[in-house]
Image (spheres, rainbow, N blue to C red):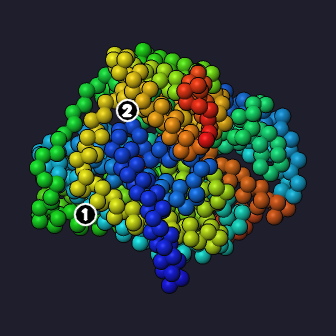
Amino acid sequence: MRRFKPAEAALSLGVLALGLGVAGVTATLPSEGGYSGIGPNFIPGVVGAGIVVLGLWLSYEAFAGGWRNAPPDDARARGEHEFNAAAFGWITAGLFAHMALIGWAGFVIAGIALFACIARAFGSLRVARDLGFGLVLSLGVFVFFVKLLNVNLPAGWLAPILGTAGI
Amino acid sequence: MEAFDALMAGFGVALKPINLLWGFIGVTLGTFIGVLPGVGPALTVAMLLPLTAKLDPTGALIMFAGIYYGAMFGGSTTTILLNTPGESASIATALEGNRMAKNGRAGPALATAAIGSFVAGSIATALLTLLAPVVVDLALKFGPAEYFSLMVFAFITVSAVLGASTVRGLTSLFLGLFFGLIGIDSQTGQPRFAFGVAELLDGVDVVVLAVGLFAVGEALYVAAYQSRLTETIETVKGSVMMSLEDWKRSWPAWLRATAIGFPFGTIPAGGAEIPTFLSYAAEKKLSRHPEEFGHGAIEGVAGPEAANNASATGVLVPLLTLGIPTSATAAILLGAFQNYGLQPGPQLFQAQSELVWGLIASLYVGNVILLILNLPLIGIWVKVLSIPKDILYAGILVFATLGAYSLHQSWVDLLTLYVFGLLGFAMRRWDIPVGPAVIGLILGPLAETQFRRALAISQGDPTVFFTQPISATFLAITAALVVVPWVVRKWRSRDSSV
């Protein structure tokens, strides 16, 4: 019995859409090529066409019984547990909090927030410990990279304590 | 003898105290991350790539190479003590190594893996020393058409020939090729697929792609599907000394595995998975104790672990002599060279002889350091294994975001990192290989340049790829690799249906 796999179908159609998008943008690129006779639009055209073909191929497999040799959909058959949406969400939240905080509050504070959220995603309920570890690691990394290697990282709110980036 | 002199000069470079220190840092870090589940050499080198702006090229490349093969040593510790299916290249070791650990023989299992890695790594480095000048002489005859055809060959073998699915391998490759197109065209200055975003005009950096796929994608996947599982770590009881019997059974396996692993590394065959399985199968067949296989046979650890290291060293042959990366880690190492404006290939052996031979000499030195690090000090690495997962992944992501952010000091790179993380999650869940995407990103722009150069030389005549004999040969082999297995499959299915 051939079954239709929605997730695989969605991914396949996504690949197809990307290919069409690449082809569409390629059509707006200039084609003058000098001696070689091909311009900056030639390879993008080839890549776009390739992605379209692969999207069609993946879609065919997804609609005709599922991708070949794909891992089983049943998590237990893969030796794993069911999809844990909270864990996925905590990682996403941590990365976005970090993104928002880094330029404004600085590297160390963004790092603490990120560390605590990721640890939470992996099931840790010891918030104080995670914040503490996050502080020690972020501060250590900041001092090592900024003071020793002279990499430019934002000090943010802690600038009065840490000094400005650089030497 | 020219190569011998060059190698001796290389030892002069590799044994300088500062380079010894970088090599030591590299192999120590490599062993450390090899032991850590979820962190591989590709990720580590990618995270450290922004440091290239601050370090001298010889020291930095020696350190990166140290991370690369140090991780091969460290990985076996994890596989033996922690029965994770883990990466595909260590499944063979997991079969026997974890059994040995359960039977209280973790010590000899770790010892045969470490000594086998040392023996295989050293022999493979010697083969690299002998083979590199030969390939360089050949490669000096290559023009743009030959390079382009060689790159096509590499693209197809790493994505379409091996692995679970041809179409998913090719999809990964083409995604990488597309990411490689984003930014300013190097030949005409035309912006492509950047949509006016300043961060995209610079192109997709390999740091963001690799760290997104390997760190963020891995963290999302493990958190979502594995974070609530419990694992058992086997303890190392008794001594790590191997008995005389263990030695007798191990050394032929090490040598056979080197002979299998090295050639597989040098051709673009998509990593260490195949040679480790071939070595395991060979040992099982040749063993005088076949009944022990599946219950902790030492040959089953000695062979695959040696094959693993021999093939990792073999990968450096096409990388250094031709500039062709055949694994994700090799592609990122190529990125490190590019950050210094260096392009690996025959010209590099002439223009930067000290650097290249210093790097090769550092492999010999590094193997010795690794043997010392991994045998007497094994107790330290076992402790690393007990770092809890929540702390481990939180730490990984602090470093991952640091690597991406330090490129432009911009949150846009962090957003791109998360998008690649989602992609990495999907690729892991639906078994789309990530290696071809990284190779496509790095090698794609080089292939486009060679393609356009070849056509410029031929005044736009596209037959140049088929009329030049070397180029035509590469394309013919590529076509055969795609067509022959397909025809054979059709043939078999027709036979069985009649």
The chain identifier of the residue carrying mark 1 reads B
Picture coordinates of residue A104, whole percent (x, y): 63, 21
* Looking at the image, residue B367 lies above or below residue A158: below
Please, what is the three-letter code of the amino acid marked with disc 1? Ala
**Which residue does the numbered mark 1 point to in the structure image?**
B253
Picture coordinates of residue B399, whole percent (x, y): 49, 36
**Local crowd at mark 1 within 10 Å, few (<14), some, or many (≥20)?**
many
In the rendered structure, the answer to whether residue A122 lies left or right of residue B143 reads left
* Distance from Cα at disc 1 to Cα at disc 2: 35 Å
Quarter of the C terminus of chain A within the rendering: top right
Between A63 and B381, the residue placed more toward the observer is B381
Picture coordinates of residue B59, whole percent (x, y): 52, 59
In the image, what residue occupies the spot 50% across and 84% down? B1
The chain identifier of the residue carrying mark 2 reads B
Which circle's residue, 1 or 2, is located before the other in the chain?
A: 1
Quarter of the N terminus of chain A within the rendering: top left
Residue A112 in view, yes or no:
yes
Picture coordinates of residue B468, whole percent (x, y): 71, 69
* Looking at the image, residue B157 lies above or below residue B348: above
Between B207 and A148, the residue placed more toward the observer is A148
**What kind of element bears circle 1?**
helix
**Do marks 1 and 2 share a subunit?**
yes
**Which residue does the numbered mark 2 point to in the structure image?**
B392
